[in-house]
Amino acid sequence: MPSRNLLVCILLYLGCPSGWVPHGSSCYYIDDTPKPNQNDARTTCQSMGGDLPFIASAEENQFVKDLVLKQNTVTLRGAWIGLQKNVTDSLFYWIDGTPLAGHYQNWNEGEPNNAKGNEGCVHTCPLNDPPGTWNDDPCNLKPDQNGYPVILCQKPI
């Protein structure tokens, strides 16, 4: 008879479509094709029944960082996450409307900084020091030496 933990793992894997990775109560999918535009990445996720990820804990952030680092394409900009700045109040909100304030955050030192004046979207940076911290950037990136974030999607099991 398989152990209870093994049965839980099997059920989790059965709950995620092929190509998606289970973690907690979600399935994650990563497409290591760099995308310069966060909205294009989000559209890709939505076409598969998911959305950009909502990172609610340090443990989940570690999982996301590790998942991104396993890809063939890893840039300094890592992967888009589902966090955006509201143009009305200049505060950050998850794409489901949940305010970031009062919830888990993992900004890189000095972030968010809006250095370019239009940094309204966020990506996780697995190569930062410390790894896995977040950075605000324009939602439509111009080419530079840092590359583009890849597509990371999340959906409930």
Image: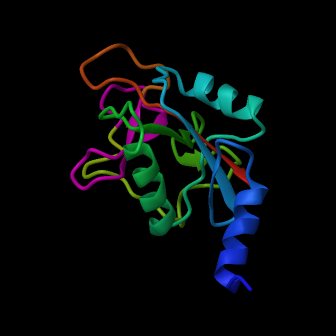
Q: Is residue 157 visible?
A: no
Task: Name the spot of residue 9 as percent of width and height, x first.
Answer: 67, 70
Quadrant containing the N terminus is bottom right
Q: How many marks?
A: 0
The quadrant of the rendering that contains the C terminus is bottom right
Q: Residue at x 59, y 28 (%)?
A: 41
Left or right position of 40 against 126 = right
Q: Which residues are magenta?
A: 114-137
Is 149 situated above or below 92?
above
The answer to whether any part of residue 37 appears in the image is yes
Based on the displayed image, in which of its 4 quarters is residue 2 positioned?
Answer: bottom right
Q: Which is more toward the observer, 94 or 79?
A: 79
Q: Is residue 84 magenta?
A: no
Q: Is residue 151 above or below residue 96?
A: above
Residue at left offset 24%, top offset 20%: 145
28 vs 43: above or below = below
Percent x, y of residue 143: 34, 13
Q: Identify the residue at image location x=46%, y=20%.
A: 36
- Closer-to-camera residue (32/103): 32
> Percent position (x, y) of residue 127?
27, 44
